[in-house]
Image (cartoon, coloured by chain):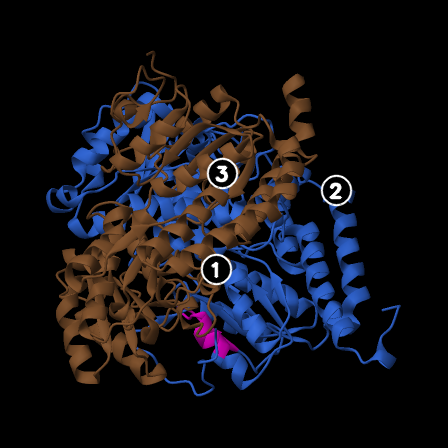
Amino acid sequence: MELVTGVLEERKDFIRYDREGCGGSGIRCDTNSVSGAVSQRACVYCGARVVLNPITDAFHIVHGPIGCASYTWDIRGSLSSGEEIYRNSFSTDLREQDVIFGGEKKLTKAIEEVIEKYSPKLIFVYATCIVGVIGDDVNAVCKSMSEKYHINVIPVKSPGFSGNKSVGYKMACNALMELIKGNLATKKQVGVNILGDFNLAGEIWIIKEYLRKIGIPVISTFTGDSSYESLIKAPTATLNIVQCAGSSTYLANRMEEELGIPYIKVSFFGIEDTTNSLIRIAEAMGNEKAKEKAVAFTREETARLEHFLSQYKKRLMGKKAAIYVGGGFKAISLIRQFHSLGMETVVVGTQTGKKDDYEVIESIVKKDTIILDDANPAELETFMKEKGADILVGGVKERPLAYKLGIAFCDHNHERKHPLAGFEGVINFTKEINESMNSPVWEYIHELEEE
Amino acid sequence: MLDYTTKEIKPREALRVNPAKTCQPVGAMYAALGVHKCLPHSHGSQGCCAFHRMFLTRHFKDPAMASSSSFTEGASVFGGGSNLKTAAKNIFDIYKPDIIAVHTTCLSETIGDDLNAIIQDIDIPEGKYMVHTNTPSYKGSHITGFSNMVSGFIHYLAKSTGKKNGKVTIIPGFTNPGDMREMKKIASLMKVPFIVLPDTSGVMDSPMTGTFTMYPAGGTKVEDIIELGDTNLTIALGELTSESPAETLKKKCNVPYKTLPLPIGVAETDAYVMALQEFSSEEVPYELEEERGQLVDIMIDIHPYTYNKTCAIYGDPDTVLGIAEFVLELGMIPKYIVTGTPGILFETRAKELYAKYGVEDYKAKEAGDLFLLHQWIKNEKVDLLIGGTHGKHIARAEDIPLVRAGFPIIDRYIHSYMPIVGYKGAMRLAELICNAILDRKDRDDAEEDFEMVL
């Protein structure tokens, strides 16, 4: 296959063009970005922060120069039904003096200033890039503060260079395990923990409501709309359901091994996945009654959506979609969702997809669909143009790119402004992609193209 | 969210809460985007680059292109030299910029990468350029980074041939593309030949063309940066941002400079126009006279509503000082001004400014944060907040209207296209301020006081 312009030689293995037959996924993924690439990828700290950030009553102290705290200050639409403290930005704002003489004293003081001001129950301390290099022992500081003040001060090992965003997810999961295991509740109760849902635009409330309807209690949520008190109850649950598999499978595995809680992967994006997930949760709980309720509920909801979707299908049928999201599981859900709307996915990429995700993706898209790992803007542009995509689903960095290309856009990331999960989400998603694709503003682009 | 903010102010030694600044590299990236066909390059972990691009994109609503050395564990132990070499090759091969502008990060600074040496070792293709600046994140702020990157371009590229070119170097400070356009417009009207460095107009406010170009039409051209060495004068707009690069040009090529505050409001725009006039000896054209007259007319129209209103202004030092002066011209009292950027000069300049207008009851703070500002407001409220998006939590908690100006604004649109500098920019700022005050009045007025005509 000829090399498409705009693609680095070193990047060829990360892209899958037209494939012959159905060999296993040969795409390279889950590695670091190439030096010099305009990668869309974030770092370990970013990964750790996004997982832990939604814990509503936690104090997130970023130990490092100010940037890491500034860039992550209240930028995720994770909603809270209680505390709002997590929406503030706390940092040690390390200065040159601290870099020369070490930042441990400043960190200790910063933690004490938080304790003095707020009487917190839970503090996370993020170790950023330079903290290890200047030799601060963040673990020791956290340990001594925990002991001195009898609260949970938990270190998050997240120097940016120590891997990619996925490693950060792991570090966050380790911090969560440290919290749970340090406060081990023992008495089991029937119910599930929801893992990998960050309550963007209030999505976890929708899923909790579904589970309530089919009679499955929710014990704890990771980490959307969670709190110290809710998190430490997690060990009492009988099942974990994992939504954002990319960020939370590792946590699920650890909880299975160390706390004996089995897990299943679920997705609430699209009718098909929402329906299957609810039924599978009931099955995994061994609750026949819940399963019946789930079948009835999802059938009802699906029927309710039928008319709505048939109206929109007329406008969406035959349009082409490009997907560029964080995790592989979400990409899979989106491909299915587009399919159900009569749309074809022509380009699909993820930032942190794993080999088995890419295998599933290959099995559900057409032979000539472009599959990308850790794509850069030039690649996205090349392939979206080549394939004539009508809409891109992505995150904050992709929006202006899509617009510049005259392509409609849907934010399926932190900046979603309404829930995209569950049956409500199907309505919102369909409306949103229709509104963006069929807006009259694109007429002016077509004019430009005709010139 | 701010329920915990206490009225009682205890000094904090270590904890930064709700910052009014960010780190150097993002400023350097923004400055580098203001050079034509330049790819900013972040020498550090890939996260830095992703964060900065996201941060700029959120403010400008335009793509911000930049590459990263993508440090790994290995690089952080053995140094990032080989990463940068690989990066340079990849970048020139595939993204084909005219110039790569490297800035460092806290990581590469701390491990001690010597960028001068590394770059000297790189095989740069014929006719292409590679420059760098040091932007340790633990010093200064994004403003310092912007300033350092501008100096970096000058340091590497500006050359003096010994023959002056009759032009003026204009350093626009950390401002929006809309501001830079206004500064250029005024210089053109004053018939002054100029080179602006950096110039993000036409890059971060580029028009819709239906195609994505990695390098939009705008930005200072490399040959123009080289030519800076032959300019007759530098006008550095914004002392705390632009004086240091002006000094670099003076040292390197002996170009004298004149430092002015950002041209925000009547007096400082006048000062900018006068400086240009001094150079060109041209009459101020009617077009500018007219704009100035309109601005004063507007200020008279709205003075019953602005007089003695108090406000708090936060953000970048030169912008905050500029807006503070303009609101003083409007008869308002900028009771609190805060910048996150460290540097005592901010407080010194503030003191002079307040003295000029005879205002004694004020607080000004360098290296402050929005938590402190909120505490001040809790002790004594103001009528208006002026600054970037991050003040919206205070605005909500204290029910104070917020006028968005400065950087970053991540919850509104169009701001980056519109100026706050020049007479036109002041008109816009006056409109934003007056509307905020009157909208609040309409909202709060009792039924019997609610009026059609204001």
Q: Colour of chain A?
A: brown
For residue B285, the mark is 2
Q: Residues within 10 Å of mark 1 (few under 14, many from 20)?
A: some
Residue B78: name its quadrant: top left
Q: In the image, residue A269 lies at what x, y percent?
A: 46, 46
Residue holding disc 3: A337
Q: Colour of chain B?
A: blue
* Labels 1 and 2 within one chain: no
Secondary structure at numbered mark 3: helix
Residue B315 belongs to magenta span: no
Q: Which residues are magenta?
A: B363-374
Q: In the image, residue A377 lies at what x, y percent?
A: 42, 32
For residue A210, the mark is 1
Q: Please identify, in this view, whether the residue under mark 1 or under mark 2 is nearer the observer.
A: 1
Report the residue at 31% width, 58% height from top: A286
In the displayed structure, A71 sits above or below B155; it is below
Residue under mark 3: which chain is it in?
A
Q: Is residue A198 visible?
A: no
